[in-house]
Image (cartoon, rainbow, N blue to C red):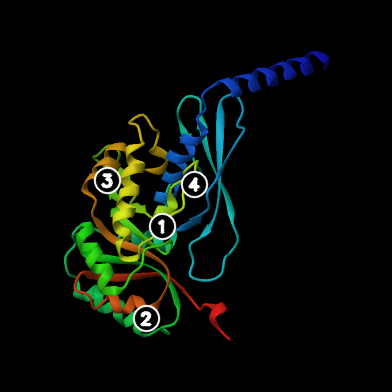
Amino acid sequence: MTVTAVLYLAFSMVDRVLWVFLDTDNGRMALVYGTAAHVVNPDKRLQHGYGGDGGLLKTTYTMTGEPRRAGPSEGETEYHIVYSRFGTVRAPSLDGPSGRLAAAIASVEADPGVDREAAEKARKTIDGLPQTLDAVAVVEFVHSMSTKQLLAFNRRHEICGGADISYIYSPSFYDDSADPASLNAVVWNRYMIEDPIPTELTYQCDTEPEAALAEFRRWVGLLDEGDDLDEFELDYAWLTDTAKEGVVHGLVVDRWELADLRKLLDDPEVRTVQLADVAFDIGAIG
């Protein structure tokens, strides 16, 4: 028993010494992998995380979040990103979105063209519901938009950038003959970046797409080819090409009123609107 205790204490001391002197770079882990978790999990409202002592062979980054629903919060869940000293990453439950919002995002294509049937179906669905309902939805464009085109779109509809709108920079991908065979959609909002030195975000309403793209390109520029993004179904080349192209294929909107979504369907640039969730805003009653 005494020998066991001594060995345990000795191992713990070595562990702590190595923990102090090894370059674990927790800040970069948060910036790279914490942000990657945000990018591929738009179905969750993830909060900024915090690092923890993972021991000799690994370090842990913990994030909390709740499902992105139109109604009241359903409570938060903890998610852990585990980074090993061998450079591999494991992030259970953060490998991609799930549910109706995931399905709506997965249906977004690059330059799909006009679909009058889909647009009419969306109109009938929205018109059949109270227009004051809050919704989480995906707005799909007829053609990919450059930043200049998106600025014009935002001005037409008086859209002000913020936490309730994210940009789909790249649709999801699947091809079993390719390597990797599947990749998650790249969904971006400037609130997503996990910066070890938080910066205050200044929005300028309809010019927000310019700032969002600049911030996305900054984040991608910090990545290395050796970063293990497999757990998030992302790829270094995929991200760098997406950042270089800089176009938007659709929007993920959070808690917009149905009346505002309905107006977008009259814009020829909008292919369709897919509702992921709707709910009454209880706080607005009374």
- The one nearer the camera, 180 or 204, is 204
Residue 259 is marked as: 2
Provide the secondary structure element on which disc 1 rests: loop
**Labels 3 & 4 near each other (Cβ < 8 A):** no
Look at the picture and state if 87 lies above or below 60: above
**Labels 2 & 4 near each other (Cβ < 8 A):** no
Q: Quadrant of residue 144?
A: bottom left
Query: Label 3 is placed on what type of residue?
Result: Ala
Which residue matches tag 4? 198
Q: CA distance from mark 3 to mark 2?
A: 33 Å
| Sooner in the amino-acid sequence: mark 3 or mark 4 | 4
Provide the secondary structure element on which disc 2 rests: helix
Q: Quadrant of the C terminus?
A: bottom right
What residue appears at the point 36 percent right and 35 percent down from the top-left corner? 223
**Labels 2 & 1 near each other (Cβ < 8 A):** no
What residue appears at the point 27 percent right and 46 percent down from the top-left corner? 243
Q: CA distance from mark 3 to mark 1?
A: 21 Å
Which residue matches tag 3? 243
